[in-house]
Amino acid sequence: MAMPPIIGITCSLRQRESDWVHELQDRYVRAIRQAGGMPLLLPRLDDDAVPDLVGKLDGLVVSGGARYPARVLRSNATPRHRHR
């Protein structure tokens, strides 16, 4: 049986009492599963760790809303398809 595509989903980072919590609404996970993917929740990471991690994903969902600055969303990236 073939492995489904691994789709990374960014998480929010919020402070809860005296600790920090990575969280994500379940609707993102359900949507990826319904589309046949395998969701992988991504914590906040240092910039130098991101390229290695993203290179192992088949897709990426940037969760959230209008808080992302335009410079973050502008990119030269193009969609690509990989087959395992």
Image (spheres, rainbow, N blue to C red):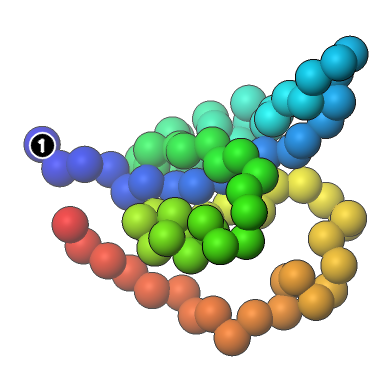
Q: Nearer the viewer, residue 22 or 63?
A: 22
Residue 25, compared with residue 16, is above or below; it is: below
Q: Nearer the viewer, residue 81 or 45?
A: 45
Q: Given the image, on which type of amino acid does mark 1 rest?
A: Met
Counting every numbered tag in the picture gives: 1
Badge 1 crowding class, 10 Å Cα cut-off, few under 14, some 14 to 19, many 20 or more, is few
Q: Is residue 60 visible?
A: yes
Q: Which quadrant holds residue 19?
A: top right
Question: Which residue extends farthest top?
Answer: 17
- Answer with left or right where residue 63 lies relative to residue 9: right
Q: Nearer the viewer, residue 44 or 83?
A: 44
Query: Which quarter shows the C terminus?
Result: bottom left
Question: Which residue is the site of mark 1?
Answer: 1
Residue 72 position, x and y percent, is: 75, 70
Question: Which residue extends farthest left?
Answer: 1
Q: Nearer the viewer, residue 80 or 48?
A: 48
- Answer with left or right where residue 30 lies relative to residue 52: right
Query: Which quarter shows the N terminus?
Result: top left
Residue 48 position, x and y percent, is: 56, 62
Residue 41, compared with residue 71, is above or below; it is: above
Q: Which quadrant holds residue 43?
A: top right
